[in-house]
Amino acid sequence: MTSVPIILSFSQILIVLAICLYAIFKGHLEWLLGIYMAIGMAGGSGTYMFGPFAHTYVILVALFVATIVHLSKRQDIKLFPPRDKWIVPWMIMWWVWIFLLIILFKPDNKTAILMSLIPRIIAPLPIILLFADDMNKIKNFAAAYILTTLFSGWKTLFYNYGISYSFLFGDLSLRQFGIYFLSGQNYHWFSYPFAISLIMITTYYLYFKSSKIFRIILLICAMNCIYFLFLSGSRQSVGSVIIVLIIMISRDVFYSRKLKLGSIAILTGAIGIISLYILRVAPYLIVRTGEYGLIEAFNLVSGRLYAWTGGIKAFIGSPIWGTGFKYFGSHNLYIGTLAEQGLFGMGFLVGYLYFIFRLSQGIRVRKENNDERLWCLMFLSIIMFGLIHSMASGSVVSVWHLYWPVAFLWRLEYSVTESSSIHKGMMRGAQAVVLAGKTS
């Protein structure tokens, strides 16, 4: 079924505009950013219509106005952390290289590339750096992202496919409707926000260890995300988020917070049960026609080898600057970069990955600032999710979550490290005073 833009009702438009106005006057740019980064992607169609206007422009305008209000209330504005500032000119040079390739080679999909690169990748980054050291705003951003993703998923199901609640509960797998995948514009794009929301929900679950009611709500949200992940048909996203969640839950940082094993068992059990149930009642959502079992379903080599081979051939034919995005379909971040941007583009990508590696080294298991470090781990996990699934789908301009979580992590990790150093210095000073008093 072909997706159509989702037209919001008059009451829904009023609600969204009310949220925008409140966020603007209160300076809650993190709310608007969470909505902006999630809406459309999880909507399947990619576009929500506010009357004659696309959501991209409405939310983006509100976001920049809220940013101005936020700046007017802050006196100490430090956009870039003092550490690793080399990444700023590095990314600017990379984007200039991409623009240059588009101008010289004029690929057929240049408009789509530019619309992905400018409003979705470049525009949010300076806004993120303004508040990424504020834990309350980070939590608000994650909450807005999760709620928007869930709303978009259900809105797409009811609006695009006309399925009511009464029919849905009779056939959760949608088999009687002849719908196997909620593909929309791009079924991988549809799946990304649900996987990212699942990572955020897991972080919230581990953070609020004392609130049972809130944890129950989070488990319900997690089950909704899993449901839409399976309906998306993106096995790359399903497999990648499972790997990331295993890494997250098994990290010593969670055990250092004195979490009970029962809490972890409830979280993993709930995720596992809903996954196994969906796989049992609707195995075709994962194992497709002509495939035999889960092993073949997740065999990325057999399914993507033709695309990878084509990308390598394209790179060999033009190794310096690639095809200028004329060959766009390698289904692999790294091979695709070589094919589309050549060795120069690959050099920029390697430098960016090195920057991510440096940031990951700053996350340590320490007793102090564990709450903040948990959220640092969340952003790193989102980055890991992007890097893993990009081996089978995605490119440097289509996987947006390879960029905005890095901006969060860069700012937050430096803030946590600095506060940790200050705390240690104060402790050492206090100990020195105590020892001096004893000796005297």
Image (tube, rainbow, N blue to C red):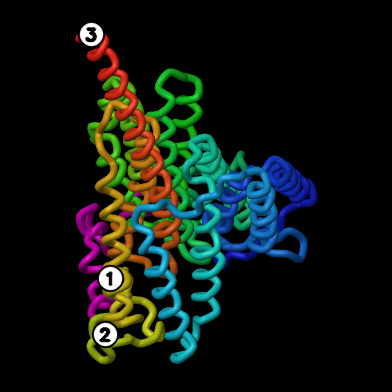
> Disc 2 vs disc 1: Cβ atoms closer than 8 Å?
no
Please name which of the two marks, 2 or 3, marks the residue nearer to the observer.
3
Q: Position of residue 252 (x, y in %)?
A: 23, 32
Q: Is residue 401 visible?
A: yes
Please name which of the two marks, 1 or 3, marks the residue nearer to the observer.
3
Q: Position of residue 266 (x, y in %)?
A: 34, 25
Give residue 440's mark: 3
Quadrant that contains the C terminus: top left
Label 1: few (<14), some (14–19) or many (≥20) C-alpha neighbours in 10 Å: many
Label 3: few (<14), some (14–19) or many (≥20) C-alpha neighbours in 10 Å: few
Residue extending farthest front: 440
User: Amino acid type of disc 3?
Assistant: Ser
Q: Position of residue 371 (x, y in %)?
A: 39, 30
Give residue 369's mark: none
User: Amino acid type of disc 2?
Assistant: Phe
Q: Which residue is mark 2?
A: 315
SS type, badge 2:
helix
For the residues labelled 1 and 3, the Cα–Cα distance comes to: 65 Å
Q: Residue at point 34% right, 45% down?
A: 279
User: Amino acid type of disc 1?
Assistant: Tyr
| Highlighted range, magenta | 283-310
Q: Which residue is mark 1?
A: 334
